[in-house]
Image (spheres, helix red, strand yellow):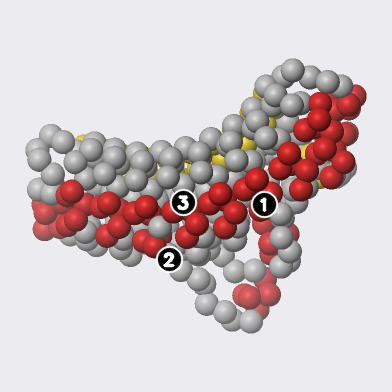
Amino acid sequence: MLGSLQAASLGDVMGVKLRQKSADTKLDLSGQDLSVIEEDEGKLLAKHYPDLEVLNLHDNRLRFLPNSLGKLKNLRVLIMSVNAFAEYQDKGLSPNLEVVGKLSGLLELNLSSCHLSILPKAIGNLKHLTVLNLSESSLSVLPTSLGNLGELRELNLAGNVPTLSTEDFLRGRPLPPPISNLGKFIGKLSNLQKLNINGNKLGALPEAISKLGLLEELFASNNNLTKLPQSLGRLTKLRKLFISWNKFDRAEKVRIRKMWPKGQVAITF
């Protein structure tokens, strides 16, 4: 691993391997203090790794993505958790995450613990995506284009609590609400089987969740919920419901237990 104070490019990390033809389908570059992928480096990666299906960039210091990353047309899994894209966003700059929307064959995308405050609508172009992890972000609004992800099976929005930039804090601006528009697109994800919205300070769940006819697991613990929509009882495939650390009174807990046939759903209060 390169020293933490040294800016490491993709060429620094991969060395001569970046310029050699490879039949590898997986490339693990996690934990390399990688801080930049230059445009020409992205082109070399696409040229010399034409069969690349899994790219792991977890735990680096990336702030910006090159357009050339969109040339990895065979990529199926992209892991970019624990990176520094938020540093660009906090300065009013774009980390160019839009380029991810060009990876039309992508099945899994992990942007967890990047503390993103903005998610580009281009993510909604990933029509074959089955797993999307946006946990530990700072999103107050999600692009409604996520409703286009018709093949999505798992959506993780846990621990998504908006924060203020230093400038907004000094100006006394209020803290934005967490994922306030969830109800505008969540009902369109007809193949969703697992939804995690733990730790979002939500005061209510959107009624649209009841449209998720294939939902099997719902994680909604550590919020500010006092009631659940009665319409959730329509979720005939639901098997696990995690709703601990909320504000349900005893009567509401009794009502929730009666929302599904006995034995269908394992409920954790």
User: Which label's residue is closer to the chain start, 2 or 3?
Assistant: 3
**Depicted 148 relative to depicted 26: above or below:** below
The residues bearing labels 1 and 2 have C-alpha atoms spaced at a distance of 22 Å
User: Which label's residue is closer to the chain start, 1 or 2?
Assistant: 1
* Amino acid type of the residue tagged 3 in the rendering: Asn
- Going 81% across and 26% down the picture, which residue do you hit? 48
Counting from the top left corner in percent of width and height, residue 68 is at 78, 43
Q: Which mark is residue 180?
A: 2
Of residue 105 and residue 198, the one placed in the foreground of this image is 105
Q: Which mark is residue 51?
A: none
* Amino acid type of the residue tagged 1 in the rendering: Leu
Taking the image as shown, residue 202 lies to the left or right of residue 124, namely left
The residues bearing labels 2 and 3 have C-alpha atoms spaced at a distance of 18 Å
Find disc 1 in the rendering and name its residue: 97
Eye-nearest disc, 1 or 2: 1
* Amino acid type of the residue tagged 2 in the rendering: Ser
Find disc 3 in the rendering and name its residue: 148
Q: Element type at marker 3?
A: helix
**Depicted 77 relative to depicted 135: above or below:** above
